[in-house]
Amino acid sequence: MKLGNSSSAPLPVGGPEFYGVLGAVASEVGRSRFYRDLARFLGRIVRSDFCLVMRYARFSAPDFLVNEVMSPEAVDLYFAGYYRFDPFYNYWRQRGHCGVVPVRTILGHNTNEHEYFNVIYREAHIHDEIAIFLPAPGGASVTIFVDRSADNFDESDIELMNLLYPTIAGLHKVHLDWLFLNSNHDIAGTLSREIPRAILILDRDGRRVFTSREWRDAERRNPQLDRAMRALKEEQPGLVEFSDNMVVHAEKLRSDFPIAPNGTICVIEPRGDSAPVTMDYAGSVNRFIAAHGLTPREGRIVELILSGYPTEEIARKLRISRGTVKNHRGRLYYKLDITTERELFSLFLPHLLKASLPAEPSAKFA
Amino acid sequence: MNRARLSIVGGSDNQPGSRLATSSGSPVGRISRSTFSANSLLPSLGRLAARVGHADFYEVALELIGGLVSCDRRLVMRYSRFDRPGFIVNQSLPSNYEASYLDGLYRFDPLFRVVRSGEVTGVMTFRDMRESQPVDSFYDEFFASVMIHDELAVMLPAVGGICIALCFDRDRRRFRDVEVFKLRQLYSLIDTLHRLHIERILIGSRGGSPFDVKMAVLLTDADGRPLFFNSIWETLAGRVDEGKLAAATSAQPSGEHVIDEDHILHWETFPQSNAVVPGGRIHMIERSSPGYFNANAQVIFGAFADRFHLTPREKEIVWLMLRGYPTSMIAKALAVSPGTVKNHRYRIYFKLDITTEREIFSLFLNDILLAN
């Protein structure tokens, strides 16, 4: 199941090959392979086993830009709702600071979030992870992850990422600028997934400079959007909710933003059940056990399976034989009318979501 | 051209290898010896990447590379196929030296020679320039003794045959292979960032030209529709017969067309892989300038020596002085004592009616430029 670039040789920073490889990454600016190559480059530096690139938005669900780690099953589970427990998703929505963020630093206080590891991280064979949050217009972030499958990153790995951050952020900025410059010539206005899909860009005088196809679709379908836009302009709340849990929000653009210096970007995103939640893991397991009428022994086994323990571990923990665990498992699957462990995770998810509390409101965007 | 301005400017410094250039009073000053540490280089690289498309891109690039090699002066020059070179960033060369260069000394610049002959490679020193194209070494030595002792140039191709050179000059020591090697490691990255910078500027900043205000630029897309032209294009384009231009440029992907005595139009087609204008074209109108100086130096020097009635020994000494030899080395080369060389020098100064060595360069420069 292990994919990715573990075969690539390590790349010492400042070594003989280093700047040449970085040059090759830079030459992908404006092209579709840019983030994949950038992630692989970082992966070689800290000897990661695989990497991943995501886009986190202000309101809507995350997106995978490059995925060389997660199996299709893990991705399904993620989008089915587990993303709402993604500590990085939570981090971006609440704090929204760019930079290098090791997973350990954001898991420190919330032990519930550790359970997320047991489901998604084990499914993806991730042992340790560093995220590099890069700013994208419209309150979004393009986030590069480097992952290890068997051991931890150490302090020097994090230092290297911090050292490289300005260069990565610089190339990323050139890349995004390029996408916008290119969109300006493209009448259809299709932008890459790096950027939120439904966007409108206004210049500093409020004139329209760019609308994406998704924005024009939304304008056609939602007469309320017009009123929402007027409210956004007149009252300057920075955020207006309109039909179907849709939100339109506006952010200022940099003075060197290519197609609209000092302009404004407006983004339409769905809002509602996508807000990050804090996991009430133990409570959810109890409710799940009660709802399906499981015996205490079965309940304990379900809890351990959901926590990601393999059969052998469960046998050791409960001081029973592997055969007995297997027998319990068989009965359990029969009762739940399922055939795979994956289905167990899917059955459990609604209980988890129902029992979980909305995370604290965003400090950055409030 | 105003020959009078060519007389080499006076000053108090008299160091070997730099009769024209000065290292004193330069705003950059002596740039400290530096290391090739990723810890210091990476933040600068980040700064450079962040300045892509900005007016200070070249200043930041100079600073980044200047942190890797010690030098006495840093410059950014523009070399083009037809026009004389231009200064883009000049942080330390006094304006009178800049004027001397633009008035004619540029024709002895080995970098100018390699650009015109298309022999440019990524990172070059004077030695590489000599090796890339074996020539009579006199003009190289003459240029080194009058203008710049040694130079390390990072050559960044732009568009339309234009090459931007990040130049690092030294007055005494030569650049060593290990220093060049460091920059060669970095070259592909700097070159890529620079290409992004050029693309960004051509498309992004409507109205600005990345090169020089004196160059007319017209950019068209693959269908020949104008995407961008600058104000000089508007002024100069009137001199071009549009029908003729269209006929000429559509027939060939690249070429040149002489407009009049002073102006030349040239164009080239971008490959389909060009990120910003695939299949598009860039047209430029440049002023034509005389090329690299190529008259026989020995012949000119012979006439020069005859005019001042120099003896064979005096001729030998002046020839070596023009090539940048200090007194001690002239003595060694001719197997005489330094005192003898000094005596000869006084007689030479008397014959030429001069009081400083600098004036010999000035006299000879006038002769060679008039002879051409």
Image (spheres, rainbow, N blue to C red):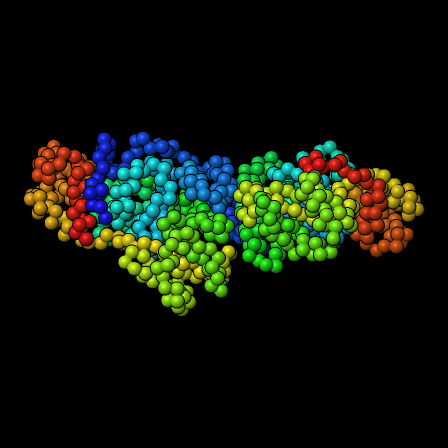
Image spot of residue A156 (x, y percent): 58, 36
Quarter holding residue B64: top left
Residue pictured at 73% horizontal, 32% vertical: A109
Left or right of A45 in this view: B84: left
- Seen from the viewer's position, the closer of residues B26 and B222 is B222
Q: Nearer the viewer, residue A210 or A8?
A: A210
- Lateral position of residue A298 relative to residue A237, left or right: right
Residue B13 in the image: state x and y as whole percent. 24, 32
Q: In the rendered view, tell whether residue B244 sits above or below residue A33.
A: below
Q: Indicate the quadrant where residue A219 lies.
A: bottom right
Position in image of residue A229 (x %, y %): 69, 47
Whether residue B93 is visible here, answered yes or no, is: yes
Closest to the observer: A351 or A303?
A351
On the question of residue A14 being in view, the answer is no
Q: Total number of numbered labels?
A: 0
Residue displayed at 43% across by 52% down = B230
Query: Does residue A335 appear left or right of residue B11 in this picture?
Result: right
Residue at 36% from the left image edge and 61% from the top image edge: B240
Q: Is residue B121 above or below residue A358?
A: below
The x, y position of residue B130, in whole percent, is 28, 50
Task: Please name the residue shown 83% across and 47% down the image.
Answer: A350
Q: Say left or right for A34 vs A140.
A: left
